[in-house]
Amino acid sequence: MRFEETYSGNVFIKSHPVFEESRVVLYGMPMDWTVSFRPGSRFGPTRIREVSPGLEEYSPYLDRELDDVKYFDAGDIPLPFGNAQRSLDMIEEFVDRILDAGKFPLGMGGEHLVSWPVMKAVYKKYPDLAIIHFDAHTDLREQYEGEPLSHSTPIRKIAEHIGPKNVYSFGIRSGMKEEFEWAKENGMHISKFEVLEPLKQILPQLAGRPVYVTIDIDVLDPAHAPGTGTVDAGGITSKELLASIHEIARSEVNVVGGDLVEVAPVWDPSEQTVNTASKLIREMILGWIK
Ligand SMILES: [Mn+2]
């Protein structure tokens, strides 16, 4: 973690060297201490950066290039291995600093639990916050095997914190019956299986509101993104996910932060997941920072 120009290691392509001059802070949250199945997402941010020079700097979708938006790659937050609570506290404090500086936080996970302290920090600044959530999984459990700090709980936590009606999930195709029922009873929006079409219908309702977007890479079909901890068949294509990012960019919502989580390079033998993730990060930067 750094806020000054002292770092000579691996950074995302075209990262601007000066924090003060940047509008966006890109940062890694290399945590996978609470995953229920395959670990490895702690290595996601590093590998996403390493493959980023393979990207073009220009987005033909958005007709913008990375030189048009100054963003600062702060590296990874040095999280204490195995200590979930202290890791979450450090993440929240880090994002507080980014927001205090008036900058846009763009995070790379790490398991999905890392999004919980980020969303909490963003909500402190934007009390009218809504969450857009792309995922294969509901992530609405109260606990997993008795443990409330689990990567299957972050959406439940933020829904209880800001009100379930302010949370919109898309692409969901896996979860316990009780989780779907809880969402329904509490007025939380879940679009099962589909992403782009329901998103187009919801976005006008969120016009003018501050929105945080959290993307679990496993919303993609395993054919598009095998490199993740909890793969689930029947997902969307990378083309549809890109279109969804662009739909948000073209909408009237005020995107105030975002993340991309659960990228696990060890399960990604041909690296299509990390290369896809890298392109998604480029489009998030170019699409959401006006
Ligand atoms: Mn998931």
Image (cartoon, rainbow, N blue to C red):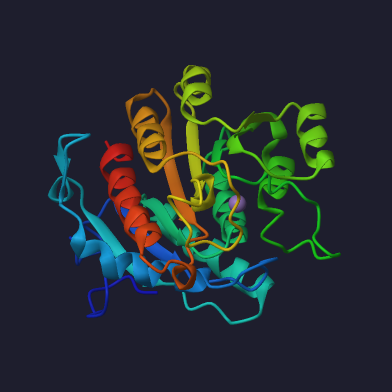
Q: Is residue 232 above or below residue 36?
A: above
Quadrant including the C terminus: top left
Residue at 78 percent of width and 28 percent of height = 184
Q: Quadrant of residue 254?
A: top left
Residue 15 in sight in this render: no
Residue at 62 percent of width and 59 percent of height = 113
Q: Is residue 195 above or below residue 7?
A: above
Is residue 164 found left or right of 215 in the rendered image? right
Residue at 27 percent of width and 66 percent of height = 51
Out of 52 and 129, give the one closest to the viewer: 52
Q: Position of residue 107 (x, y in %)?
A: 43, 57
Out of 40 and 284, give the one closest to the viewer: 40
Is residue 163 found left or right of 40 in the rendered image? right
Q: Quadrant of residue 85?
A: bottom right
Quadrant including the N terminus: bottom left
Out of 176 and 202, give the one closest to the viewer: 176
Is residue 193 found left or right of 278 in the rendered image? right
Q: Position of residue 284 (x, y in %)?
A: 34, 44
Q: Position of residue 22 (x, y in %)?
A: 24, 55
Out of 289 and 268, give the one closest to the viewer: 268
Q: Is residue 229 above or below residue 5?
A: above
Residue 198 in sight in this render: yes
Q: Position of residue 41 (x, y in %)?
A: 51, 68
